Image (tube, helix red, strand yellow):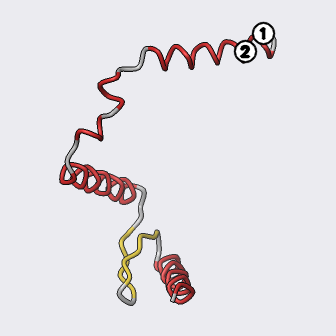
Amino acid sequence: MSLLKTKSLLLGLAAMGMMFSDPKTRGYYDSLSADDIKDLDRIREENRLAKLKQQGVKEWQIDGFIVYARDEKNAKRKVENAKKLLNQKL
C-alpha cells in the first residue's frame, strides 16, 4: 500500500471514530461532583500503589518523606533529590 493510501486510510478511520463516538460519554466528568472526582482519584492512587507493590516496590519513610522504591539505596537517592528540589524552590 502506498504512503498516500495509508495516510488516507488512517485519516478516514479517525474521522469515523469521531462521528460514531458516544456523546453521552464525552462529557462524563462534567456531570460528576467534586466528591466523586476525589473518590475516583483516590481509587486510581490505590490501584497504582497496588500495582507497584506487585512489582516489588516498597514504601520507605526517610526524614519525613514517604517514597516508593525497590531498595533503600534508591529510596535515599529519591529523598535527596526531593530535598534539593525543595531547597531550590525556597
Compared with 46, 75 (above or below) is below
Which of the two residues, 5 or 18, is positioned nearer the viewer here?
18
- Judge left or right: residue 36 versus residue 10: left
C-alpha separation, residue under disc 2 versus residue under disc 1: 7 Å
Counting other residues with Cα less than 10 Å from the Cα at mark 2, is it few (<14), some (14-19), or many (20 or more)?
A: few
Q: Look at 79% across and 14% down and name the residue there.
A: 4
Secondary structure category for the residue under label 2: helix
Whether label 2 touches label 1, CB < 8 Å: yes
- Judge left or right: residue 87 versus residue 34: right
Q: Quadrant of residue 54?
A: bottom left
Select label 2 or label 1 by which is in front: 2
Which of the two residues, 29 or 10, is positioned nearer the viewer here?
29
**What label sits on residue 6 in the rendered view?**
2
Who comes first in sequence, dot 2 or dot 1? Answer: 1
**What label sits on residue 49 in the rendered view?**
none
Please state the horizontal and vertical placement of residue 86, each as a whole percent of the image: 50, 85
Q: Which amino acid type is shown beneath numbered disc 2?
A: Thr
**What label sits on residue 1 in the rendered view?**
1
Please state the horizontal and vertical placement of residue 25, each as a whole percent of the image: 32, 28
Compared with 28, 52 (above or below) is below
Q: Which amino acid type is shown beneath numbered disc 1?
A: Met
Which of the two residues, 25 or 44, is positioned nearer the viewer here?
25
Q: Look at 41% across and 70% down and name the residue there.
A: 68
Please state the horizontal and vertical placement of residue 10, each as a whole percent of the image: 64, 18
Compared with 29, 10 (above or below) is above
Secondary structure category for the residue under label 1: loop
Q: Look at 72% across and 18% down and name the residue there.
A: 7
Compared with 89, 35 (above or below) is above
- Judge left or right: residue 53 versus residue 70: left
- Judge left or right: residue 90 versus residue 40: right
Quadrant of the rendering where the N terminus is positioned: top right
Furthest residue toward right: 2
